[in-house]
């Protein structure tokens, strides 16, 4: 049995995965239409949209790694990478609010 907690982070992760899955399914319809009906425009649109989706997901993963890892800025100090950890903390509101959310998530998932 898989235990799904009802924390804000778990709900956010589920919604994000649903959106990505629905997007991939919608893009795949262009491929199906293009192959079944021999519509070259639909196949071209499929390739372009899939490439853009791939770029967006890679960009999001790179941003998430930069934000989550505090020591990444130290290893790239010569290239003057901005400290995303402080930027995220300053721009996304009260630190105590997020600490409470993360703490409750850790307690519910028994981390």
Image: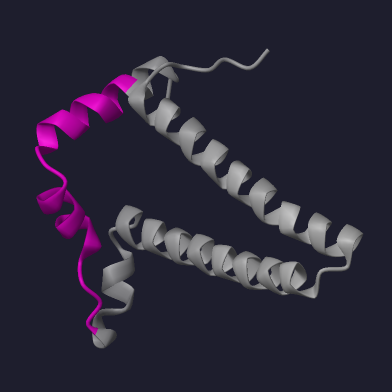
Count the marks: 0
Of the pair 2 and 51, the residue shown nearer to us: 51
Which quarter of the figure has residue 11? top left
Majority SS type along the magenta span: helix
* Type of colouring: one colour
Q: Quadrant of the C terminus?
A: top left
Which residue corresponds to the image point at 40% horizontal and 16% vertical from the top-left?
108
Which quarter of the figure has residue 94? top left
Query: Eyeballing the image, is 7 above or below 23?
Result: above
Q: Is residue 25 left or right of residue 98?
A: right
Residue projecting furthest to the bottom: 78
Which residue corresponds to the image point at 37% horizontal and 30% vertical from the top-left?
9
Query: Eyeballing the image, is 57 above or below 78?
Result: above
Let me know if residue 6 is in the magenta part: no
Let me know if residue 100 is in the magenta part: yes
Which residue corresponds to the image point at 22% horizontal and 56% vertical from the top-left?
85
- Percent coordinates x, y for residue 30 in the rendering: 73, 58
Query: Eyeballing the image, is 7 above or below 31?
Result: above
- Percent coordinates x, y for residue 41 in the rendering: 73, 73
- Percent coordinates x, y for residue 52 in the rendering: 55, 69
Q: Quadrant of the N terminus?
A: top right
Of the pair 32 and 108, the residue shown nearer to us: 32
Q: Is residue 92 left or right of residue 111?
A: left
Which residue corresponds to the image point at 34% horizontal and 53% vertical from the top-left?
68
Q: What stretch of residues is rendered in magenta?
A: 80-104
Q: Is residue 108 left or right of residue 29?
A: left
């Amino acid at each position: 049995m898989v235990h799904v907690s009802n924390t804000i982070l778990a709900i956010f992760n589920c919604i994000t995965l649903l959106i990505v899955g629905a997007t991939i399914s919608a893009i795949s319809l262009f491929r199906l239409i293009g192959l079944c009906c021999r519509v070259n425009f639909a196949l071209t649109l499929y390739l372009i949209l899939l490439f853009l989706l791939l770029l967006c997901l890679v960009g999001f993963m790179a941003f998430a790694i930069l934000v989550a890892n505090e020591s990444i800025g130290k290893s790239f100090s010569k290239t003057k990478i901005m400290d995303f950890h402080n930027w995220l903390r300053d721009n996304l509101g009260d630190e105590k609010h997020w600490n409470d959310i993360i703490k409750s998530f850790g307690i519910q998932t028994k981390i």
